Image: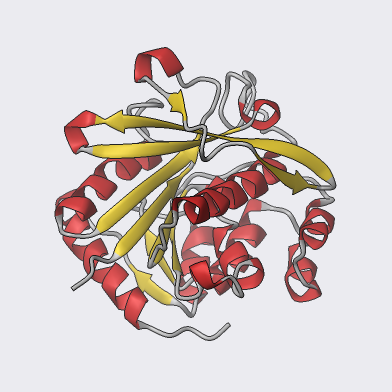
Amino acid sequence: MEKKKILFVSQEIAPFLPKSEISSTARRLPQGIQESGKEIRVFTPRFGSINERRNQLHEVIRLSGMNLIIDDNDHPLIIKVASISAARMQVYFIDNDEYFKRKNTTADDKGVFYNDNDERSMFFCRGVLETVKKLGWQPDVIHCHGWMTSLMSLYIKKLYNKDPHFADTKVVYSMYNDDFNNNWDPRFAEKLKFDGFDDVVVNQLGDTSFENITRVITKYADGINVSSEELTPALQTIFDEATCLKQEYVAEENQTKVMSEFFNKVIEETVLI
């Protein structure tokens, strides 16, 4: 039987960035899923705070060189790769000087979130999908960690839904108590429309708050799971009201087994959008 393919997409992964709830899960879970018999690929942004020399990142020339248009502007897509030898796992990095060269990840030194995080999320999600196509690797499930990956379900269900490479791909979104406290650009919906999204999607995203974006993207996900031991009341409500397949929080020692089985369930389930 052919191995199921799980694409892990995370806004941060240890040891390339400091340990956090997201970075630790995104480091541990792919290894466990790989050891359980599934095939994996792992993608993350190449933030400027990641030390390329120490982590031995190098550019993959055959995958780089594409330009992605975001809000009518061309942005070069650069792909880098590094290995986590202890996990026998490669990590692909989505890079672009304008979006990811700055020395902080999602907010400046004062904790103010960058006003182009919406575009960075768009670029990152599209960059992952275009790179996976170049690799010729067809994921059964894309498992998303962190709000910078949240748009993945929209892209798969609304823009890449006619692409045979992703015809059967399902999306699982992990919910963490990790948010942004200032809204995305008020022009976010306009940028999505330029990207090719229809009015059904665009009209839902005039409100660019973290809560509304999370609520909308869960409508297009095939599965969601709780990755923080206790969600905020607002996130818990979104989780409770979601109609896709759901997985409650699971302790670390049982996570690999439960999530592997959840992926199987999501793959087998047909969800109509």
Image location of residue 250, percent across then percent down: 24, 58
Residue plotted at (52% across, 48% down): 131
> Quarter of the image holding residue 159?
bottom right
Left or right of 228, for residue 80:
right
The count of marks equals: 0
> Quarter of the image holding residue 107?
top right
Left or right of 218, for residue 34:
left
Image location of residue 29, percent across then percent down: 26, 49
Quadrant (top left, top right, bottom left, bottom right) of the N terminus: bottom left
Q: Nearer the viewer, residue 19 or 154?
A: 154
| Scheme by which the image is coloured | secondary structure
Quadrant (top left, top right, bottom left, bottom right) of the C terminus: bottom right
Tell me if residue 53 comes above or below residue 269 in the rendering.
above
Q: Residue furthest front?
A: 62
Image location of residue 106, percent across then percent down: 59, 33
Q: Residue furthest top?
A: 53
Q: Nearer the viewer, residue 80 or 9?
A: 80
Residue plotted at (77% across, 64% down): 196
Residue plotted at (64% across, 23% down): 108
Image location of residue 208, percent across then percent down: 73, 54
Tell me if residue 216 comes above or below residue 51 in the rendering.
below
